[in-house]
Image (tube, rainbow, N blue to C red):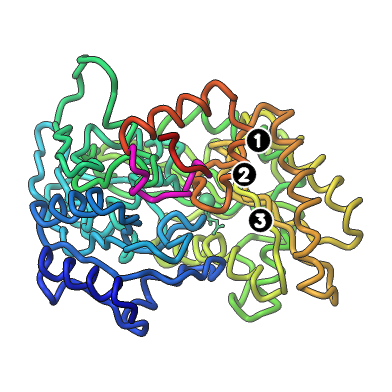
Amino acid sequence: MKRQDSRTIKSLEEILGPDNVLSDARDMAPYVVELRRRFNNPARAIAIPTSLDRLQALVKWANANRVPLVPQGGNTGMVGGQVPKNGNEIIVSMARINRVRKVDGDGAFMFAEAGVTLEKARRAADGAGLLFPLAIAPQDKAQIGGILSSNAGGLQVLAYGNARQLCLGIEAVLADGSLFRGLNGLKKNNTGYDLSSLLVGAEGTLGIISAASLKLFARPEGFETAFINLASPEAALELFRELSRRLGTSLTTFELMPDFGIAMQLRHGMIDKNPARSRSDWYVLAQVSRLPGQDRNGLSQGLEAARNNRTIKDFVISGKPGEQRRMWQVREQLSSAQSREGASIKHDVSVPVSAVPELIRTGCKAAGKIVPGIRPCPFGHLGDGNIHFNLSQPVDADATAYMEGAGKIHDAIYEIVAELGGSISAEHGIGQLKTGLLKEYKDPVAYEMMKKIKNILDPNNILNPGKMLDQAPEQ
Ligand code: MLT
Ligand code: ZN
């Protein structure tokens, strides 16, 4: 260990206590390596504050000594925002600041600290007879701080919104160590700039979220889930229109899947059988949540009507947890199925819902022109306009050569997305993966505003440097 590093470790141990600092490479590995193993840079140390005071003292020290910090939750992010970029950073794990401070049933909110896992937050809401609806995997790892910092989306955005919309206010430690106290349980709070909202989705570049006020909802009594056969994304859009009109916000999920995604799972023994009634080119997984006293037939009636007018070919529907689980499994395994079929070029993009079929049609055509034999697997949250436009390598292609050509495919897909009025990042964020793209596609005035805000709130660029905005602040 370099002398400078051992001095740093000593300072960290003084601030946080020796049990809350890791510097051995083996101990640091789970924090440094992320899910997809795309980013592989070392950290100087892992700091694990156990209280707000210690977190504030740590950030103050880092600011005074110009030490870069990378805030980290459950390390489940997809774009490298939560792991080092330059190799000289200290990762600040929020795992030990993890209390649910309160649950307020009347106001329908809870105060949860950053290190509370999604599972724990959902259990706390459940204990009060309420629902915290955010649904991303893995629930036992993803933490509230990371979820809010990355403005995560997931499987129920359609009905409840993404992380930002589920947040009433936050508490965060700013770059100078001061505490922003934005926690409140107010539905109405019309007092100027929405600073909490600014820090949500900032990927730890403006402050370290230490706690959040989360909105809670009435807990459904049950669910109806359907697995639907369709001929095309156009038909899926038509069905979405019809079901939204009938079911409103009780329609919590509307997910599109190509047959290729299911064929892969069958081929690799990940499922025994297709949960649909028969094979078709496309499928939709739709779910309705039912509040006490609500009619349980809304979804089946909507689907019967759609079958009668030939919008859909067929469907199966179930209210039984075991059968629902099997349907969900197919949706949840789509990404891992792709990883068993070689390399995959991925895009987490959104377009207006009405443009989803055009995105899929033109995107598949463009990709097929660039790489003949490419196997598109566009899937995801059609109801939010958010498609994971993933493309598996041609059978027998060389994976490395395929990935080397990714740039051309990216350019084509992002151009189509921009033309359709969409976004180059729908729910995974910018992190270190999309800093260049953000600069290219964000409105230049908006990009300048972001740089100015960063400069003011973090003039020494110690908070997650190089993430989101690929630049050092102007001094
Ligand atoms: C999903 O919706 O399954 C994920 O956001 C997609 C992914 O893992 O890339
Ligand atoms: Zn997704």
Q: Is mark 3 within 8 Å of ligand 1?
A: yes
Per the image, is 53 magenta? no
Which residue is at the far front?
A: 3
The quarter of the rendered structure image containing the N terminus is bottom left
The image position of residue 76, as x and y in percent, is 41, 62
Per the image, is 467 magenta? yes
Q: Which of the two marks, 2 or 3, is nearer to us in this view?
A: 2
Of labels 1 and 3, earlier in sequence is: 3
For mark 2, what is the residue?
436
Q: Looking at the image, is 82 positioned above or below residue 436? A: below
Task: Give the magenta part as a residue range.
Answer: 459-470
Say which quarter of the image contains residue 384.
top right
Of labels 2 and 3, earlier in sequence is: 3
Are the residues at dot 1 and dot 2 in contact (C-beta closer than 8 Å)?
Answer: yes
Amino acid type, callout 2: Gly
Nearer-the-camera pick, 297 or 238: 238
For mark 3, what is the residue?
346
Q: Is any atom of residue 234 visible in this view?
A: no
For mark 1, what is the residue?
440
Amino acid type, callout 1: Glu
Q: Looking at the image, is 411 positioned above or below residue 50? A: above
The quarter of the rendered structure image containing the C terminus is top left
Q: Looking at the image, is 290 positioned above or below residue 185? A: below
Amino acid type, callout 3: Lys
Q: Looking at the image, is 252 positioned above or below residue 316? A: above
The image position of residue 363, as x and y in percent, is 79, 44
The image position of residue 232, as x and y in percent, is 76, 44
